[in-house]
Structure formats: C-alpha cells, structure tokens
Image: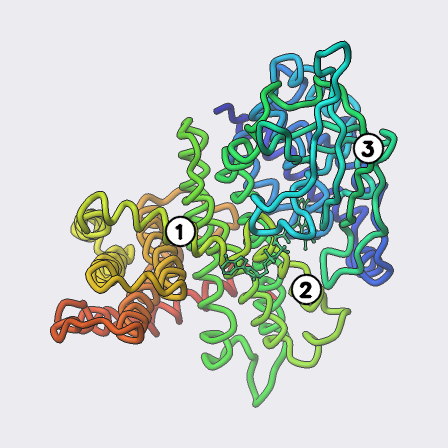
C-alpha cells in the first residue's frame, strides 16, 4: 500500500490547521451548528487543489491522487475531527463512496470515475443503508433490474429508497448498493440522473455541518458500465473489503473529537479555581475527569497506528482490527466528551464553550460504519474462532508475548496486559465448555473484553518503543498512560468476565481459582502515582 512522505503529510496538516484557524473560528462553527447549514464553500475549499485538495490524499497516484495510505487517512481524519466532525463526515462520505470503485472497479471504471473525482473535486455519497436494512444490509430491498436491448442486457433499472446518506442531498456522484439478479451489487449513478431524488436534510442531534438525506430511486436507468466490477453479486464482499480502512477513519474521528473536548477541559482546569486552588490541582477532578480519558484515547491511538501500519504493509482485510480500533476510539471519544462537559461545570452545559457541541458530534461515531454493538459481535465472533482453532491457546500465547515484553521492559504495562489476556483466555474457555455464548449478551461482552485486552497489549508494545508523539506527549508519560490503561484492562477482563460467566450459569466450582484475580488486584499497585504523573504532563502539554 502506498503512503506519502512525512513532509507532504505535514504540509497538508499545517495547511488544514491554517485554513481552520482562518475560515472556521469558534463563532463560525457554532453558527453552522445552530443554523444547521451545509457549508458548501468549506467543502469546496477543502477539495480545491489550489487550497488543500484533501480528496486527492485518498486517491491513487495513477488517477491523479496523492496515493495516501492508512496512516495518512488516520492523521488527516483526526485533524479534521478536531475541527468539526460534521465537515469531517462530508469528506468521509466521499472516501466511502469512492471505495466500491477503488476496490472493485474495472480498470476503465477506476480511470473514469477516480480521474473525475480527482480532477473535478466531486462530492460523493455512499448509498448502502435503507429503511429496512441498517446493521443488516442483507435485508436490502433496492433492486437493479437488467434492461435488455436486442436480447442483450444493456443496463439496469434501479428502484428503491436509501436512508441516512451523508452528502445525500449535495453529492455529484453516488455509489448505490442494489439487489441485481446475481446478488447485491454497487452501481455508480451521477447526480441529475432521471428518477434519482434526495429528501430534505435530516434534523440531527449533532454533526449538523454534514448533509444527511434519504435518496429515492424511481426507475433510474443506468448503463451496464455503471455496475462496479462488471459482475453482479460482489457488493457485500466489496463493502467488507474496506472495513479495515473505513473503520480506521471513523476511529480517528472518535480520537479527534474526544481529544478536542478533553484538551478544552485540561486547559479549563488550569484557569478555574474553586475551594482555594485550581481545579487542575485537585485529584478528585483530574483523576476522574481527565486522566482516565487521556489514557483511553491514547490506547485507542496506539491501536489505530498499529492497524494502519499493518494495512500500509499490505495486509489485506483487518476487519476485526478495524472494528477494535473504531470501537475503542469511538467509545473513548464519547466518554471523554461527556467528562469534558462535567469538567467545565455550568459552562460545559452551554453552547459557547464548545464541549457540548463536540459531545453531540462525536455521538455519531458509535453509530455509523457499524454500531458499537455490531462491532462487539464482530470482535467476539472472529476472536472466538481463533480461540477454537487454537484450542484455547490464542490469548494465552498473546499473554506469553506480553510477559516476554515485560521481562525486557518492566515499565510499559505489559505485565497487566498479560493478566488481561490470560483472564480472557480462561473466561472464553469456560464459556466454551458451558456453552455460554448461546446468550447473545455474553458473546457481545466477550467482544468488549477482547477490545480491552488487545488494546492494552498493543499500547504496551508501542509505549515500549518510543516514537515522536503526534501531540507531543513524552515517552515517560506515554508509558505511565499504558500502565494505567493496562491495569484497568486487567481489572475489567477479570471482574466483568467473571460476572458474565457466573451470571450465565458457569458450572466449574474452581472457576475463580483459575482466574488471575489476585494478580489483577496486585497489579493496581502504583496506579495513583502514575495518574499523578499523567495529570502533571497533561498540564505541560496543554497549558491553561
Ligand atoms: C448521521 C448519519 C450518517 C450516515 N451516513 C451513512 C452513509 O453515508 N451511507 C450509508 O449507507 N449509511 C449511513 N448511515 C447509516 C448508518 O450506517 C446506520 O444508521 C447504522 O448502520 C445503523 O443502522 P440503523 O440506523 O438502521 O440501526 P439498526 O440496525 O436498526 O440498529 C438499532 C440498534 O440495534 C442494535 N442492533 C442492530 N442489530 C442488532 C443485532 N443483530 N443484535 C443486537 N443489537 C443489534 C444496534 O447496535 C443499534 O443500537 C448514517 C447514519 C447516520 C445517523
């Protein structure tokens, strides 16, 4: 997979920052949110190669793009989300909408459509969801009926309705998923095609700078060349093929939104005094509202970066890793934004201070591109298969690797990560023996525990091999964060895992003895001291 050089990426990021500072000050962002207007000019500027040309980053070089890889997608998505998640969603939609062509298009289709998207800066929309087909896309009802001419199919007639389509009312190009006789297939449809209309923009809770609309397809005639890949029935596989990528993008939105809120809270605590001292000096404030969220967000970043590096090294798929990244980052982003409102007290509850808007905006990240519950299911199912195939060794092996790492580097949280991984293996095995995953809730909770344990492991690994941090957090602070997070993961996997296994009726009287309960408790030693260190470093990086 191609990537662009660091200088080019830095240039894009700094141009984006300058643009946001100039064109999207706080008052403008708040008024776009309040008035619920689609910022046409902003999207135009972002896509204008003379200004930023953001869409070029996602397009391959041979079609006029810059050929950015997953790492660049993550960095730019995080930066966009820090500015405004609604604007970021408009860009995401173009990226998503282009994906079926990028993954499954014929060489001619790629050259034609990606060439035009690059050159004309077309806004694209991705039309998968329908009123009856949300999380379950197989319930798709939109049809693509072959349209014969002289006995040969020369095109298709599309009929149906799409719902919740980002850029739905403003796009110039649509990729539409429809049921052809050979199965679900993607079709490229240009705006203005007879029979294609959009509903009025949805009145949304957040990301109000993005346009979301229903699409109506009434006898929309498209030529045969608009069938992506030229073969029917590839649609769901093509959608699946890019989940690693697209979920990473939404993960970066959770990260960017969460940090945008948390940064405001960290600064605020250094300006506001109550009870005779600054809020930032009070553990009851920092260790509840700031530190755990910073650690969770940085754990998510570590997992995003690790997944991006694997995608950029050419590993295909990585849908489960994409799911873990998105789940962890979007849940962390939501929790951080919620805590930021609390951290600002009454001010946090008003629009002017922005954290209230960020909280509404970041809320979408646990819904689109796979809801958190669907991701819990994905993570549980795929890792459950690993557990079965390896006869219970998968997470035990991971725990052994974490213990090795702890041997080489005792201060990166790998010991606590090993406890989490060991507990996960034991809980999974108990669930297998007692057939507990027949309870959907138990299966989904295992998905959540997979995310905690794996993220703790990856965070420990990345904290152990320091590299320049994108937000300037130093190596010592990052290691303290990894330790805080891994302790939380160990505690969570042991006690939540036990709760659900016992709650679902596990039958082994010696179950607790097999769980690392004592180790998970002992691993908490030093927790408050580490949180003190993190609290101090957050003040240094984000002064008041
Ligand atoms: C602002 C916005 C923008 C969007 N943009 C796009 C876009 O550009 N293109 C596009 O195609 N779609 C888009 N979507 C659609 C989005 O992907 C869907 O909303 C999402 O996949 C969930 O589908 P749904 O809304 O039908 O909810 P449902 O699938 O009905 O889910 C409702 C609830 O039930 C849970 N649930 C669902 N199935 C199960 C199950 N089997 N077991 C347990 N729990 C379950 C879900 O987790 C959720 O909590 C957008 C949505 C929004 C709100």
Q: Please provide percent x and percent y for residue 339.
A: 56, 72
Please say whether residue 484 is visible from this viewpoint: no
Q: Please provide percent x and percent y for residue 334.
A: 57, 63
Q: Please provide percent x and percent y for residue 426.
A: 20, 61
- Looking at the rendering, the quadrant in which ligand 1 lies is bottom right
| Residue matched to label 1 | 379
Closer to the camera, 329 or 198?
198
Q: Residues within 10 Å of mark 1 (few under 14, many from 20)?
A: many
Disc 1 versus disc 2: distance between alpha carbons? 26 Å
Q: Residue at left 52%, top 50%?
A: 471
Q: Residues within 10 Å of mark 2 (few under 14, many from 20)?
A: some
Q: Earlier in the sequence, mark 1 or mark 2?
A: 2
| Residue matched to label 3 | 219
Q: Earlier in the sequence, mark 1 or mark 3?
A: 3
Label 3–label 2 contact, CB within 8 A: no
> How many numbered discs, if any?
3
Label 1–label 3 contact, CB within 8 A: no
Q: Name which quarter of the figure residue 232 lies in.
A: top right
Disc 3 versus disc 2: distance between alpha carbons? 37 Å
Label 1–label 2 contact, CB within 8 A: no
Disc 1 versus disc 3: distance between alpha carbons? 39 Å
Please say whether residue 347 is visible from this viewpoint: yes
Q: Please provide percent x and percent y for residue 41.
A: 85, 41
Q: Name which quarter of the figure residue 501 lies in.
A: bottom left
* Mark number displayed over residue 360: 2
Q: Is residue 413 left or right of residue 43?
A: left
**Secondary structure state at the residue bearing disc 3:** strand
Vertical arrangement, residue 61 with respect to residue 371, above or below: above
**Which mark is nearer the camera, 1 or 3?**
3
Q: Residues within 10 Å of mark 3 (few under 14, many from 20)?
A: some
- Describe the colour scheme in one phrase: rainbow
């Amino acid at each position: 997979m191609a990537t662009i050089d660091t200088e080019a990426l830095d240039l894009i990021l700094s141009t984006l920052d300058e643009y946001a500072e100039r064109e999207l000050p706080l008052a403008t962002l708040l008024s776009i949110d309040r008035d619920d207007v689609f910022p046409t000019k902003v999207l135009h500027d972002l896509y204008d190669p003379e200004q930023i040309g953001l869409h070029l980053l996602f397009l391959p070089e041979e079609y006029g793009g810059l050929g950015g890889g997953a790492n660049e997608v993550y960095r730019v998505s995080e930066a966009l989300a820090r500015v405004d998640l609604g604007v970021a969603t408009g860009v995401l939609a173009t990226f998503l909408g282009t994906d079926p062509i990028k993954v499954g298009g014929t060489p001619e289709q790629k050259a034609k459509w990606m060439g035009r998207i690059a050159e004309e800066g077309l806004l694209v929309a991705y039309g998968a969801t329908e009123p009856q087909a949300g999380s379950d896309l197989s319930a798709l009802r939109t049809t693509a009926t072959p349209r014969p001419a002289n006995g040969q199919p020369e095109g298709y007639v599309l009929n149906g309705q799409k719902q919740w389509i980002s850029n739905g009312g403003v796009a110039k190009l649509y990729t539409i998923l429809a049921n052809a006789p050979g199965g679900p297939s993607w079709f490229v449809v240009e705006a203005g095609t007879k029979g294609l209309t959009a509903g009025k923009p949805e009145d949304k809770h957040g990301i109000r700078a993005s346009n979301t609309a229903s699409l109506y397809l009434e006898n929309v005639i498209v030529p045969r060349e608009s069938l992506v890949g030229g073969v029917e029935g590839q649609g769901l596989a093509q959608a699946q093929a890019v989940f690693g990528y697209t979920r990473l993008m939404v993960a970066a939105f959770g990260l960017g939104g969460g940090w945008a809120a948390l940064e405001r809270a960290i600064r605020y605590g250094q300006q506001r005094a109550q009870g005779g001292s600054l809020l930032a000096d009070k553990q009851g404030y920092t260790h509840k509202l700031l530190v755990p969220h910073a650690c969770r967000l940085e754990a998510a970043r570590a997992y995003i970066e690790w997944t991006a590096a694997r995608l950029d090294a050419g590993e295909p798929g990585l849908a489960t890793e994409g799911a873990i990244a998105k789940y962890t980052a979007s849940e962390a982003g939501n929790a951080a934004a919620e805590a930021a409102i609390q951290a600002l007290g009454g001010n946090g509850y008003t629009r002017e201070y922005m954290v209230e808007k960020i909280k509404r905006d970041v809320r979408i990240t646990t819904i689109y591109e796979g809801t958190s519950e669907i991701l819990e299911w994905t993570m549980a199912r795929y890792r459950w298969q690993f557990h079965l195939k390896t006869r219970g060794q998968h997470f035990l092996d991971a725990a052994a690797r974490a213990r090795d790492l702890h041997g080489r580097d005792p201060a990166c949280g790998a010991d606590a990560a090993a406890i989490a991984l060991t507990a996960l293996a034991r809980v999974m095995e108990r669930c297998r023996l007692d057939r507990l995953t027949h309870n959907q809730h138990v299966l989904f909770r295992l998905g959540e525990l997979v995310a905690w344990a794996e993220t703790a492991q990856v965070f420990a690994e990345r904290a152990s091999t320091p590299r320049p941090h994108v937000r300037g957090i130093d190596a010592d602070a990052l290691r303290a964060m990894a330790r805080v997070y891994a302790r939380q993961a160990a505690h969570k996997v042991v006690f939540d895992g036990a709760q659900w296994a016992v709650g679902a009726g596990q039958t082994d009287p010696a179950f607790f003895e097999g769980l690392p309960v004592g180790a998970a408790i002992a691993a908490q030693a030093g927790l408050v001291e580490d949180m003190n260190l993190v609290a101090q470093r957050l003040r240094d990086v984000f002064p008041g």
